[in-house]
Amino acid sequence: MSTSLIILAAGQGTRMQSDMPKVLHRIAHAPLLAHAMHAGAALEPERVIVVAGHGAELVEAAVAEIDKTAQVVIQEDRLGTGHAVLQARDAMKGAEGNAIILYGDTPFIQPETLAAMTEARSRHAVVVLGFEPEDPARYGRLFMDGDSLEAIVEYKDATEAQRAIPLCNSGVICADLRQLFSLLDEVGNDNAAGEYYLTDIVAIARQQGLSCGVVRCDEAETMGVNSRADLAAAEAAFQARKRAEALENGVTLTAPETVHFAWDTWVGRDATVEPFVVFGPGVTVETGAQIRAFSHLEGCHVSTGAQVGPYARLRPGAELANNAKVGNFCEVKNAEIGEGAKVNHLSYIGDASIGEAANIGAGTITCNYDGVFKHRTEVGARAFIGSNTMLVAPVTVGAEALTASGSVITEDVPAGDLALGRSRQANKPGLARKLMDRLRAAKAAKQESK
């Protein structure tokens, strides 16, 4: 049976104290909304509808980056969660099967949990995701009769006896698409908040003789983000889970609490990650690679046996082949570093291709930008680039060629050649002492005049 997603993302999030829509604040370098959409994507949904409100244009732009097939609909008047879901009715015309309702500010629902809800939907008209928190606080309560869910009671409307129920409502619901909108048409707003509650569909379904059930999950999956403090707590929770996952998968983290992952970081077994490494989005580190301390990686690929850092920066488009080395205080951007090649010290390699076993000397810079366009540098296999070489792109240094230290290379260097691009040194006998004596005398005169 096919499944569609309805993701509620219309809230302003006033407690965030931000001009940005709440669902666009980031955890592990991805918007809260993206986490919810990625979880649902595991179900291969037929349709994805995001209900936006505050900052709708920003939300729409973010959705397009996350999933170009998703559609955004607008909730002009925010009259409750039931009203929000109804805004998706027209966008769902012609769709069949299940609908799962998620929340853009609840980032940690797991794909396995959603799969369990779709499986339970085969036995119930409506399935609600429930959990038992340490502190039930102001959550809505799930009123059960044996294994049957009879109603969801919002905290504001609950009696003291109902508030004593430990099983709480996460807000996530799975229902038959056609029945969902039919049930929502029956929802009223005669409650303490004057809103149309999505949760009322359970009681309405039971009145119609339909079965309702509950799937339970761990409290950690239901963590919502409503404030900056919540955002920080959610980031910490994500990092703790990602570090545990890495260790479980055979990655060595020498100081796990200091390593920060992005939502999509992939690190292979027997790789080593030293302290204070930060992974931005789009990083893959293969088996046996070593990422040394204080390095920052984003949008890059590090192959088997390669070494990065310490204090290295790999920017988007950096590709390190097997056993390549990028050392301390080096930056690589949109460049391929060939197998066994070395970029060891204080160098910038951008828009370039470095051949296998080439050696890039300390202080080398690929001068890739002319103020308007970017240009590429090609360094051949086993070439040796002397320290403090400026490679002014576009330029090619052939295989097994050598550039002299301190050279500015503006023309191609054929394979096997030595290139020198610097002025001839000239020594002026005794001139250093004369200059220094003159300067010291000028300084002394200036001090006396004061």
Image (spheres, grey):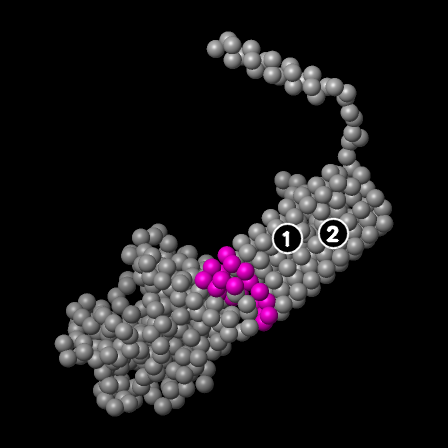
Q: Nearer the viewer, residue 175 or 183?
A: 175
Task: Between residue 273 and residue 128, name the one nearer to us.
Answer: 273
Front position in the image: 278 or 375: 278
- Magenta highlight on residue 258: yes
User: The residue under label 2 is which amino acid type?
Assistant: Asn
Give the residue drawn at x 52%, y 65%. 253
Q: How many marks?
A: 2
Q: Along the horizontal axis of the image, is 205 left or right of 67?
A: left
Question: Mark number for residue 327?
Answer: 1
Q: Quadrant of residue 306?
A: bottom right
Would residue 402 be found to the left or right of residue 299 on screen? Answer: right
Q: Secondary structure at mark 1?
A: strand
At a point 75% along the width and 47% down the height, the residue shown is 385
Q: Is residue 239 left or right of residue 217?
A: right
Q: Main secondary structure of the magenta part?
A: loop
Quarter holding residue 437: top right
